[in-house]
Amino acid sequence: MKEKLDDADLQILRYLQADGRMTNADLARKIGLSPPSMLQRVRKLEEAGFVRGYTAELNPEALGYHLLVVAMVSLSLHQEGSIEQFRNAAMAVPEILEILHISGEYDFMLKIVAKDMRDYERIVTTHISSIKAVGKINSCFVLGVNKHGTTLPL
């Protein structure tokens, strides 16, 4: 990803961030390029790693996930393999949406969705606490989301 982005590339990325379903023809028209040229540029941006993929953002509450938790996890073991063991085990839990390896008092920050408190308890006891290296879990229950986004400033 050492490629230099020109103004057209940045415009393409802005439009794709706003609407990943925009057709190649619409994108070409908005930027002022031919559709074949646009397709080539988009593919180049994808291949260079500037575009990770295209997804639909689902509404967790509409699907029954009414609890959002940020769990701070400290590992009791910091031996070689303990961090990787935790990471692999956490990645296998579908309710864990994000796993951030952090510095400071805690080692990991997890973003977890659950249907309710009982479901969260199941996730913690069955999946997180059972990992040998886990020492401490501090659960922060999200009261409201004031800003949510994935749009990068370009």
Image (tube, helix red, strand yellow):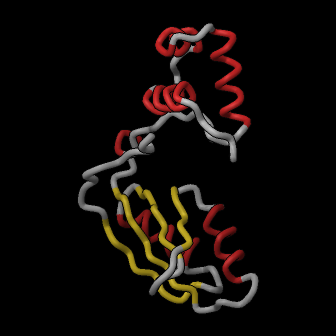
Query: Dividing the picture into quarters, in which one does residue 53 lie?
Result: top right
Image coordinates for residue 90, horizontal then vertical, percent? 61, 67
The residue shown at (43%, 72%) is 71
Is 118 on the left-hand or right-hand side of 83? left
- Residue sitting at x 46%, y 61%: 112
Relative to 90, residue 154 above or below: above
Q: Where is residue 54 in the image (x, y as percent from the top left)?
A: 58, 33
Q: Tell me what residue is drawn at x 64 percent, y 25 percent.
A: 42
Name the residue at 70% across, 26% down.
43
Number of on-image labels: 0
The answer to which of 104 and 71 lies nearer the viewer is 104
Residue 142 in the figure: left or right of residue 25: left
Q: Is residue 126 visible?
A: no
> In the picture, which quadrant includes the C terminus?
top left
In this picture, is 58 found above or below 126?
above
Against 107, residue 27 (above or below) is above
The one nearer the camera, 34 or 20, is 34
Q: Position of residue 123 (x, y in %)?
A: 51, 67
Rendering coords of residue 92 (x, y %): 65, 61
Answer whether residue 8 is visible to the viewer in this image: yes
> Quick one: 139 or 6, which is closer to the camera?
6
Q: Nearer the viewer, residue 77 or 100?
A: 100
Quadrant in which residue 23 is drawn: top right
